[in-house]
Image (spheres, grey):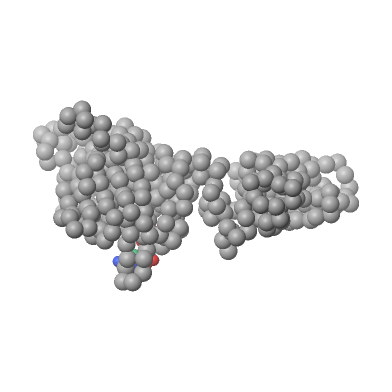
Amino acid sequence: ASPSDKAVQTTALSLSGVRHTFDTRLVVKGIDLDIAPGEVVCLLGPSGCGKTTLLRIAAGLEVLQEGSVSLEGRTIAAPGQRHVPPEKRSVGLAFQDSALFPHLNVLENVSFGLKHLPARARHEQALALLEQLGMADYAQNYPHQLSGGQQQRVALARALAPRPQLMLLDEPFSSLDARLRDRIRDDTLHVLKKLGSATLLVTHDPEEAMFMADRIALMRDGNIVQTGTPRELYCEPVDPFVVTFFGEVNILKGSIHKGCVQTPMGKIDASWLPEGSGVEVMIRPEALKLAVRDLPAKAHNHSHVIMAKLLGRSSLIHLCVHGEDGQEAHLHARVPGVFLPAEGQPVDIDLDRSQVFVFKSADAIT
Ligand code: ATP
């Protein structure tokens, strides 16, 4: 490639104006998404929002109906143009139910895409990946001798072995139990970053997306709602759906008065919203900082504990919160570690404003 070709090649994968209809139902509604070389992007969203369909379009497993798909600056699918078939797209694919070749052992499965290499290099490259994914001991086993989770790891190794410039992964950790999943995610991310493969990974699990992604594209009902780094989606959500997708949240209703909304924990600035508009104040449980007060139980006009539950790494506290103006609200607080105040214990509450979001009621979803 000439230097000018290199300058043009700023995206590993580019989806532009992609729309897709099944029968008469529009399930992908005009998606634009670019992935830079070496970047890991997670398509995150609830079941049925169109993630898998979009990934299958990128892979060429679903025929593109509208829009275009480019790989490394080259258009490989567009209406009226001959599509480049999946096997010619030089992408690595691993799906939830990726079938291994049943008549080949694990090492042969992983070596399959390395036929261009001399036997020794092929063997070493495949074995190195199996080691990284904790499957080297099973190199001589056949797929039917493996558990679902082990098969999934071999499928991942097989997809990664040819060191593709682009990896397309659909729920690749779903068959793994929780403890193993953490490790395999970690190992997979390490391999992806070492190989420098651009990756589009589909998941419905926000924690998985935050761990794996350089950027997350959060989808709802065939559209991308917000694209950004995990920090941007968590700390600068564009709408209530984005807030709630990352975990339970307290919601208080109110209205804007002099640029603020009154809550039992004090005034919250919302000066960008019109005076008088109805709003929802979304307060993450971890935004409520609690300090116990040495007062009689359920002291008059003081916030108090209704119930405290230990969840393991954190404690969940149900609170009755009293505001200065007589406002009362029932809220959930989440506190790190073991914090189990007695029922009725008066508490002082401090609010971490960075975990509080105000949206006009009309934006709220039910
Ligand atoms: P999940 O997380 O449950 O896999 P998803 O976000 O990946 O969901 P898709 O599998 O892309 O969602 O499906 C999007 C919508 O398109 C769903 O409503 C689904 O029922 C529908 N759909 C998917 N494949 C087909 C098909 N081959 N024929 C008809 N409808 C389909």
In the picture, which quadrant includes the N terminus? top left
- How far across and down, in percent of the image, does residue 243 sit? 56, 51
Q: Residue at x 28, y 59 (%)?
A: 66
Q: Is residue 244 above or below residue 131?
A: below
Would residue 342 appear left or right of 223 to someone viewing this image? Answer: right
Q: Residue at x 40, y 59 (%)?
A: 222
Res. 117 image quadrant? top left
Farthest top residue? 3
In front here: 293 or 260? 260
Farthest front residue? 274
Would residue 328 appear left or right of 241 to someone viewing this image? Answer: right
Q: How many marks?
A: 0
Q: Is residue 121 above or below residue 25?
A: above
Can residue 285 be spotted in the picture? no
- How far across and down, in percent of the image, does residue 49 sit? 41, 60
Q: Residue at x 24, y 40 (%)?
A: 72
Would residue 334 appear left or right of 116 to someone viewing this image? Answer: right
Farthest bottom residue? 24
Would residue 340 appear left or right of 284 to someone viewing this image? Answer: right
Res. 30 image quadrant? bottom left
Res. 47 image quadrant? bottom left
In the picture, which quadrant includes the C terminus? bottom right
Whereabouts is ligand 1, in terms of quadrant?
A: bottom left
Q: Residue at x 44, y 61 (%)?
A: 221
- How far across and down, in percent of the image, does residue 334 sit? 65, 46
- How far across and down, in percent of the image, does residue 302 sit? 84, 49
Can residue 326 be spotted in the picture? yes
